[in-house]
Amino acid sequence: MSKFFSQKFKNISPYCAGEQPQDKKYIKLNTNESPFPPSPYAQRLARESAGDMLLYPDPEYSALVNIAAEKFGVKTSEILFTNGSDEALDYAFTAFCDDSAPAVFPDITYGFYPVFARINRVPFKEIPLKDDFTIDINDYLNAGGTVFIANPNAPTGIALKLSEIEKIIANNPKNIVVIDEAYVDFGAESCVQLIQKYNNLIVTQTFSKSRSLAGARLGMAFACEDIINDLKTVKFSRNPYNVSRMTAAAGIGALCDEEYFLGNCEKIVKTRGEFTEKLAKIGFSVLPSKANFVFAKHNVIDGKTMYTELKNRGVLVRFFEKPRINGYVRITIGSDEQMEKAFKVISEIVKGIK
Ligand code: PMP
């Protein structure tokens, strides 16, 4: 740290993103990207927009917003596009958390939430998950702060039902509830339509997972018009041109190519089921996942050893050095070919130790 770094940030530890190795070729199952390339149409539109890069983009992203409104069945005034959904979440911490509305989220969830709280200098409260790693929705009724719930949750992959999410929203009339649907397309129920019914709901989604655009950085927030305008106040005060022209073009292509998107989600769900069954047969307990990853614990080998042994053999997964979950590794669901190779390596590790 330099001597000039503001004292107000001296205790910040930044979010620890998954490794993006540039040295060696791994089977990369550590950051929940899609194994499939972006839709050919998305690629074409991005390429065609390259020549327009001399100009700033439309800060309202009207073309993209119009298509998203049609696809999701909401009004154009109810959508905001952001530089990845991380940016939408960050804006929500800025706009809707303070001493009178601390952030409230599970103790085991997306690791960026406490970092967003700290960088925005807002208090936060972490509520323990139950022993089976599910969320007790009673903990979130009249939560006394701005609620952040990832549905499905990360890194567990466990999803709440739409009726449970609605109960949380309905029982926090004085506070905002943010539902982070980064992984919703892999089998959970989206609550986007509830923005028409509740004026305290924000739903965030991303193009990084199911739409194969992690490298383009595109996310979105859905909420009633007043809330979107608050988020826009933050955006236009920080970074009006937050989405690049090429990314916005790719986003249009990805939204239009529904068949490709649905087909890829279906493949991931199928592979997830098969991979889970195979892991169970060699001594893993696997949490019931509705995401494009599984959170799995071997009955003999601890999480850190599994992570290290896999990395040494060219397979990257994610390990969290945190009580309660340090027995687990999070494994992204890749293509069938990747998962077959990964399973072979996992089996070898399991056999070698026994
Ligand atoms: N929410 C959750 C739960 C995530 O795991 C991620 C991915 N790291 C995000 C949001 C953010 O994704 P992105 O910024 O790529 O849209």
Image (cartoon, rainbow, N blue to C red):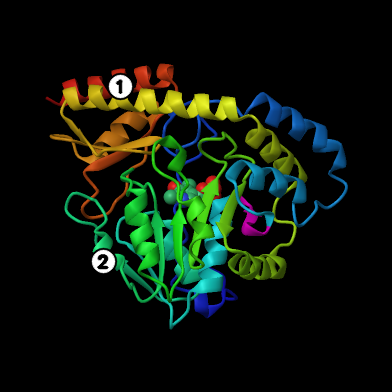
Please tell me in which quadrant of the rendered image residue 95 appears: bottom right
User: Which residue is rendered at x = 49% and y = 35% of the image?
Assistant: 33
Quarter of the C terminus within the rendering: top left
User: Which residue is rendered at x = 40% and y = 63% of the image?
Assistant: 169
Q: Is residue 337 magenta?
A: no
Q: Nearer the viewer, residue 346 or 209?
A: 209
Image x and y of residue 231, in percent: 62, 66
Kind of residue at disc 2: Asp
Is residue 40 left or right of 35 when viewed as pictured? right
Kind of residue at disc 1: Glu
Position above or below: 297 against 14: above
Q: How dense is the environment of label 1, judged by Cα within 10 Å: few (below 14), some, or many (20 and up)?
A: few
Image x and y of residue 347, in percent: 24, 21
Is residue 199 left or right of 296 when viewed as pictured? right
Residue highlighted by disc 2: 139
Residue highlighted by disc 1: 274
User: Which residue is rendered at x = 46% and y = 53% of the image?
Assistant: 180
Please tell me which of labels 1 and 2 falls first in the chain.
2
Badge 1 marks a residue whose secondary structure is helix
